[in-house]
Amino acid sequence: MEFFRLLSRGAKLDNADAFGRKKTEDKKSDAERIVRELDFFHTKTASEKKSSEDGEITKRERKPQAKIESTIPHRKSNIRGSDIPQPLASFEELATRFEVSQQLLGRVRFNTPTQIQAEVIPGIMHDRDILACAPTGSGKTLAYVLPLVQLVQKINEEKKTGNVKALILVPTKELATQVLEQFTLLTAGGRAGVKANILTKSLLARLTSSANGAAEKTKPGDVLVATPLRLVRALDAIELEGLRHLVLDEADRLFDTTFAEQTDQILGAIRKQQQDSLQKTFLSATIPSSVETLALGLMVDPLRVLISPGRAAATVDQRLVFAGTEAGKLLAVRQMVQAGELPPPALIFVQSVERANALMHELVYDGVNVDVIHGERTESQRRAVVERFKKAEVWVLICTDVFARGIDVHGVNVVINYDVPQSAQAYIHRIGRTGRAGRTGKAFTLFTKDDIEAVKIVVNVMRESGCKVEDWMMRMGKADKQMKKQLKRKPSEREEIGTQVKKLKAVEDKKRKEKKAKREEERLKKTEKKKKKKQKDAENEQKDADEEEL
Ligand code: ADP
Ligand code: MG
C-alpha cells in the first residue's frame, strides 16, 4: 500500500496512540450509553422512541470496533464503534444535550438534520474520531461545521490564544471557499467569537513574514480552511499547539497519489507539535477500503459511519448514451442543446484541459452560453467563472475532475459525462454535482465502443445505486481488475474533439464551393448567351432597317 508507506514516514500509524491521543474519559450519561437506535429517518414518534428507550436501556460495554449493523433491511448504512452516541433527532436537541446556544441554532437554516448530520454532530460533540461516508449532497459540511463552531467557541471562552483550534483540509480552493462560507454563516462573520479564515496566498505571506520577525504579527484565526500544497508551505509559520480538531473533507482524495505526500507532511507536522488530544473527522462520499484502513489506523476508538457506501446519490437519474463515435458525442450534445434537454445550469465533464477548451470552442460556435474551468486557469479566473456560473450568467460549464469534488452549486439540473470517468469514485463525485440536498437531477454518460471497460464500472455503480439497468448492460459483466487499474492511471486516448466534424465541414465546404462555382459558371454562360442573342437581335434589326431603306 503506497499511502501507508508514505504516511507512516511522517505520521506513525500506531493505532493505540495516534497523534499522542489518549482515549477520552467517558463522560457520557447512562442515557447516552444505550443500545443504538437505528431510526435514521426519525420516523418513530416521540412516544415510540421513549418506550423503546425505557424498555431497553442497556449499558454498552466500551468495546473498540464493536460492530452494530443497521437492521433496516433496505438500507446499506451502518455505524460501527464503541459507545455510539444517540443520533440527533432535531437541531433544537443540541441546546439540551450539548448546551448549544439559541443564537447559534438560529443561524442554522434547516429544519431537520440529514442522516449524516444526525450521526456526526453528536460524535464530534462527544470528542470522538469519526470516519464518515455519505452520499454527495447529503450535508456533510454542516455535519462538522456546526459542532466545531460550538466547540471552538467554548475553547475561546476558556482561553483565547489566537492559535488555530480547528484545521479543515480540502482538495481544492473552490471547496475551501464553500466551507468558509458555512463557517462565516454560523459565526456571524466572526462576531460570534470564532474567527475562520482560508489560508490564502496573502495570509500565507503575512504568516511567513510574521514568523520571520516582522513587526506586524499575524494570527491564522481559530478555524483555518486550507488546501494541502499551501498548508505545507505554511507549516513553519503556523503554531499548531492548541490544535484540537482536524477535518479531512474529501478524505479519499487527500490520501490519493496527487496529495498523499503533502497530506503525509501535514499529518507528520501535526503529530510532532500536537501534544494535547486531537479529534479527527474524515469524510467523503467514497472511501475505498485501502483509505479506510489507513484512516482508521490514524484514529483512536473511532466511530465509522457508513451511509449508502459505494452508491451514487439516489436523487440522480443516471443514463448511459451510446454515441457511436467521438463525433457522435458532439452531435449528441448539440442535439440536447437544441432539444432543450440541457436546462441550465448544467455541467459537462471531460478528461483533459485540451478537451475542455476544444469543446468550449465548439459550443461557443453554436451560440451556447458556455465557459470552462480546469486546473490550468488562474485562481482569479476560476473564482470568476464559479461566480458567474452561480449567478446563472454561464449556463453550461465545461470542467475537468478538479470541479468534481464537493462543489455545491444550487440546482444543477444536468451533468454530462462527455468522456466516461476513469473510476467509480470519479463517476460518483461528478454526477453528485446534481441531485443535491434532496433535489432531483439527471446524469448522462456518453460513450463509444472504445469505452466498454470504463462503462462496466459505471454500470456497476448504477446497479449498486438501484438504478434501472437494461439487459445489455447486465450482459457486459464486471470490469477486469487490471483494466480498472490501467484506467485509473491513464485516461483513454481519444480523437480530438471536433476533428471528425471539422473533416465533415471541410467536405461540405468543398461541395458548397463547387456548387457555387458551377452556379456562377452557368450564370456567366446565360449572360453570355443573352448578350449574344441581344447582339444578334440588334444585328437583325439593323439588317431590317437597311433593307427598308433600300
Ligand atoms: P456534501 O458535502 O455531503 O456533498 P454539502 O454539505 O455540500 O453536501 O450540502 C449539500 C447541500 O445541502 C447544501 O446546499 C446545504 O446547504 C444543504 N443542506 C445541508 N444540511 C441540510 C439539511 N439539514 N437540510 C436540508 N438541506 C441541507
Ligand atoms: Mg462536501
Image: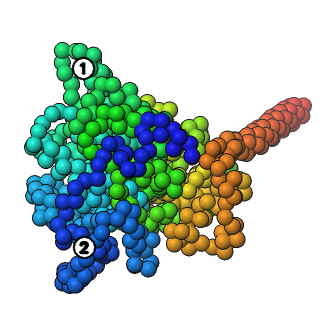
Residue 390's mark? none
Q: Which quarter of the rendered picture does the C terminus lie within? A: top right
Quadrant of the image occupied by residue 510: top right
Residue at (36%, 61%) from the top-left corner? 64
Vertical placement of residue 531 versus 247, above or below: above
Ligand 2 within 8 Å, label 1 CB? no
Q: Amino acid at mark 1?
A: Ser
Q: How crowded is the residue under tag 1: few (<14 C-alpha within 10 Å), some, or many (20+)?
A: some
Tag 2 residue: 59
Q: Residue 2: percent from the left, percent from the top? A: 56, 42
Foreground pick, 81 / 424: 81
Residue at (67%, 64%) from the top-left corner? 478
Marks 1 and 2, Cα distance to the nearest angstrom?
A: 52 Å
Residue 210's mark? 1
Vertical placement of residue 206 versus 32, above or below: above
Left or right: residue 261 compared with residue 227: right
Q: Secondary structure at mark 1?
A: helix
Q: How crowded is the residue under tag 2: few (<14 C-alpha within 10 Å), some, or many (20+)?
A: few
Foreground pick, 375 / 26: 26
Q: Secondary structure at mark 2?
A: loop
Tell me if residue 374 can be seen. no
Q: Amino acid at mark 2?
A: Lys
